[in-house]
Each structure stands twice: as C-alpha cells, then as structure tokens.
Amino acid sequence: MDVSNKSVLFVEDSPTMRRIIANSLRRLGFADIIEAENGIDALEKLEGNMVNLVVTDWNMPEMNGAELVKVLRSKPEFSMVPIVMITTRGMKDDVITAMKLGVNAYVIKPFTPEILKQKLDSVL
Ligand SMILES: [Mg+2]
C-alpha cells in the first residue's frame, strides 16, 4: 500500500523508542510524520492539523495514550481516524480496555517491522 501521501501523528515518550519507531514508519513509506512525546504535546501539535493515522504509546507522562485516545474519539473530526497503540502492556485486560476506548489495532513491544506493517495495513 502506498502511504507516502498519508500523514501520521506518532506519540511516544521514550526518545530511543521514538527514533526506532519513526524510522520504521519512514521505511514503510510514511513521509509526513508529526512526532510528539506525550498526549498533551500531541494535542498541541495537532491543533489545526488533520492526520490519516495515529500511532501512540500507552504509558507516558503528562497525558498517557489511553487518555489521548479518549480525547481524540470525543472530537468529531477524529472520531474515525485509525488509531494504533504500541505498548509494553500485554495483558488481555489492557487490550480490551484499549479497544473499548476506540483503538483499532494493538501492537505489543517488542515487535518486528513485519508485525507493525501488518497492523498498519489492517487499519488503513
Ligand atoms: Mg512510554
């Protein structure tokens, strides 16, 4: 799938993970990536912007990924945007909680580039 024309909001608090995952997204063809380090930062950077995809971590300071998903899903313009959560939280209850909040796909760290590609393909 050609994703070079799709914009993505990518939220991750760990600088190392942010670099790794942003590189993966670039390798998959995404050229327009808005990077943010937590939910608050993400909402500020989204101000006035629209994206085709949101990729977010769960555990983050200031505003975590679950809270960010709640806020995004409450906004009409973001109610349908695909959201992929990438997290170390691998318990079944976590997955269920995320899905109930409106997350479309769930990736558990550590993950392979193939898994990431599959999950992104499944929501785009
Ligand atoms: Mg984190």
Image (cartoon, rainbow, N blue to C red):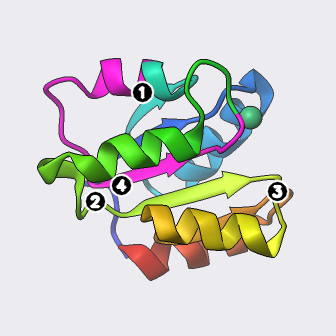
Q: In the rendered view, would you say 114 is above or below 102?
A: below
As shown in the figure, which amino acid type bears the numbered disc 2? Val
- Is residue 20 one of those drawn in magenta? no
Question: Circle 3 is placed at which residue position?
Answer: 109
Mark 4–mark 3 Cα distance, whole angstroms, equals 19 Å
Task: Give the x, y percent position of residue 60.
Answer: 68, 29
Task: Give the x, y percent position of residue 56.
Answer: 55, 45
As shown in the figure, which amino acid type bears the numbered disc 3? Lys
Q: Do tag 4 and tag 2 residues touch (Cβ < 8 Å)?
A: yes
Q: Is residue 34 visible?
A: yes
Circle count: 4
The secondary element bearing badge 3 is classed as loop
Q: Earlier in the sequence, mark 1 or mark 4?
A: 1
Question: Circle 2 is placed at which residue position?
Answer: 81
Q: Earlier in the sequence, mark 3 or mark 2?
A: 2
Tell me if mark 2 has few (under 14), some (14-19) or many (20+) residues whose alpha carbon lies within 10 angstroms of its own: many
Q: Residue at the location (45% across, 20% down)?
A: 40
Question: Circle 4 is placed at which residue position?
Answer: 53
